[in-house]
Image (tube, rainbow, N blue to C red):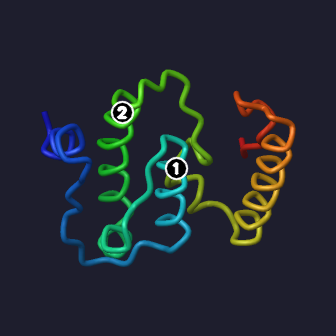
Amino acid sequence: MKQNAILLRRRNKIIVPTGTSSLPVPIVATFNKNLEALGYTLSPAVLQALGSLNEDEATELYTEVIPVLQELKGVKKYRPMYPNFPRQVMEAHAAELYLNAVVHYITAAISDGLGDKRRRFIWLPR
């Protein structure tokens, strides 16, 4: 069992390795956004540490953390904003990411207004 899996289960924390790179801001934001679907968000310190990783390190951390959080929350049907993270974000243009976020939040507001507890009407990119 990896160290982050134990920390998440016992302390609700993760360790981000010390990085020497600069992860693009859209990837850092998407990492956090995908965690929000499971009811989590990263602290400012973790966001900053995540930003110092390279793409491979961030992907490794992401693939380590997501299954543990799914298990902790009992989530069987996980629908992240960008399922092919981080590749999907890296390949998208900034305007596309922006428009995806706008449409997602508008449909989330409509879903909330309709009282859609299962959140079936929220748009997610393919």
Compared across the picture, whether 121 is left or right of 32 comes to: right
Q: How far, Cα to Cα, is label 1 from label 2?
A: 14 Å
Which residue occupies the foreground of this view, 36 or 29? 36
Residue at the spot x=48%, y=44% of the render?
39
Dot 2 alpha-carbon crowd within 10 angstroms: few under 14, some 14 to 19, many 20 or more: some
| Residue 89 in the image: above or below residue 82 | below
Disc with the residue nearer the chain's start (1 vs 2): 1
| Residue 88 in the image: above or below residue 37 | below
Which circle marks residue 36 in the picture? 1
Percent position of residue 57, x then y: 30, 59
| Amino acid tagged 1 | Glu
Q: Check whether the beta carbons of the residues at disc 1 and disc 2 lie within 8 A of each other.
A: no
Which circle marks residue 106 in the picture? none
Compared across the picture, whether 118 is left or right of 36 comes to: right
Circle 1: element type: helix
| Residue that badge 2 annotates | 67
Q: Quadrant of residue 56?
A: bottom left
